[in-house]
Amino acid sequence: MRKLPTDHYPHRHDGDATAASLHLADVTMFWAAESGGVKRYLRAKHDFLRSTHWRHTLVVPGTADDASNEVAVVPGVPLPLSHGYRIPLRTGPAIRALCALSPDLIEAGDPYRLSWAAVHAGARLQVPVAAFYHSDLPAFFRRLGGPPAELAAAAYARKLYPHFDTVFVPSRYIAQKVADLGVQRIELQPLGVDTRLFHPARRSLRWREQLDLPRDARVLLYVGRYAPEKNLHVLCDAVDKLDDGSVLVTIGSGPTPPRGKNVRALAYEGDAQHLAAAMASADAFVHAGDQETFGLVALEAMASGVPVVTCAAGGLSELVDEHVGYAVPRCVADDFAQALQALRQRDPVTLAHAARRHAMQYDWRAVLPQLLHRYLALLGRQTGTAAETTLPPARERVRASRGR
């Protein structure tokens, strides 16, 4: 790997900034015992970076018990109904933690106070700062408070994201959303899947038997948050319309667990091996969320050889096609029921092979080297070895904003 000039880093004195000695700090509030896709991304990235001899540190809200050599914690108050998330009330502790770590590169994984801490720490350290746009902020607030809340969230995002040297987005859908906010530095960086963990060979008859279902039951699986934006009522209504022995099995946690005569709502599964067995043991995977920025859990189902039926909305519309299942045009029960009926008429072996083959393109072993290349390019941009862009570096924008 190429050697980076050390004179760019006034806070360093070791004289060696080879890629093998670089240090990335990830900062996010999306880290808890029952976290979802962001945590899986960070864990996969951590393992990959360790194999390439990078140093990787997480800065997350938590308690002293959560701290380790690889996790620095900052104060945060528990977020109600979030099953473990904490939100910092001040940026100062995170800024100090990041400055003490003195990383070469910072990535912010949420749009709240920790993002501002990343921006200001990067300015002090004179290192590049990236953001990963994991959640569609305006859409989330629209569901909470209607159009006024959506407009306020969009205005906030327009203020925040131009401060970053680049904004990673997991799908073209989100790339357009971020571009509409006026952000100019956007890089498409899909997420990935552990295809060794999520594998058809993990299919388990015992898992199905433990559900105490008829042997010929058709298991439709949902994995994810029990939250309004997941539209779980659509799935419950769809399975009732089928009247063919189908059962909706859900795994997750949240404020709005699904209910119904053909529904089995299970608790969050923190054991990755058990989750992979459940995924491979389903007959189909279903997801009615219309705000997914990527759709990681659907990809995990495909890696398990399971066909999927989702809404043709958000990032899911880019992952799901007729070869691996169906992306229904309307997020309504009738459309889901029709798609699930049609799926039953198709050859399951052909579907399983197609789903697995599609997911293999997103194996973390293929995706994360792309991300590493982007990191090195970002470091090169900061040292002047990459082409100039239309926006100044983040630290200059921070200084300019302070002067207004």
Image: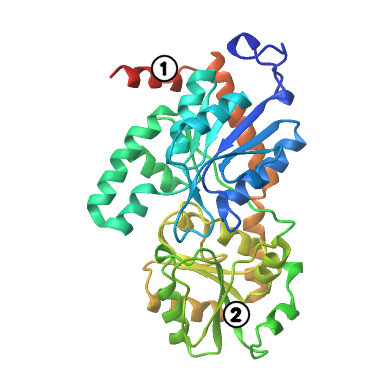
Label 2 Cα crowd, 10 Å radius (few <14 / some 14-19 / many 20+): many
Amino acid beneath label 1: Glu
| Quadrant the N terminus occupies | top right
Q: Residue at x 70, y 31 (%)?
A: 55
Q: Is residue 228 visible?
A: yes
Residue 59, image quadrant: top right
Image position of 175 with respect to 250: above or below: above
Give coordinates of residue 261: x percent, y percent.
Answer: 49, 88
Spot occupied by residue 359 in the image (x, y as percentages of width and height): 63, 56
Mark 2 and mark 1: span between their CA atoms?
A: 54 Å
Q: Is residue 103 visible?
A: no
Q: Residue at x 64, y 66 (%)?
A: 269
Using the image, determine if residue 161 lies above or below residue 254. Answer: above
* Residue identified by numbered label 2: 219
Find residue 141 and report its horizontal and vertical position in percent.
Answer: 33, 52
Residue under the image location 27 percent in, 44 percent down = 152
Check disc 1 and report the residue beneath it. Answer: 396
Residue farthest to the top, as pictured:
7
N-terminal label among 2 and 1: 2
**In this rendering, would 196 be left or right of 165?**
right
Tag 2: amino acid: Val
Q: Residues within 10 Å of mark 1 (few under 14, many from 20)?
A: some
Q: What residue do we see at 46% from left, 17% from top?
A: 388
Residue, far left: 148
Residue 196, compared with residue 398, is above or below; it is below
Image quarter for residue 204?
A: bottom right
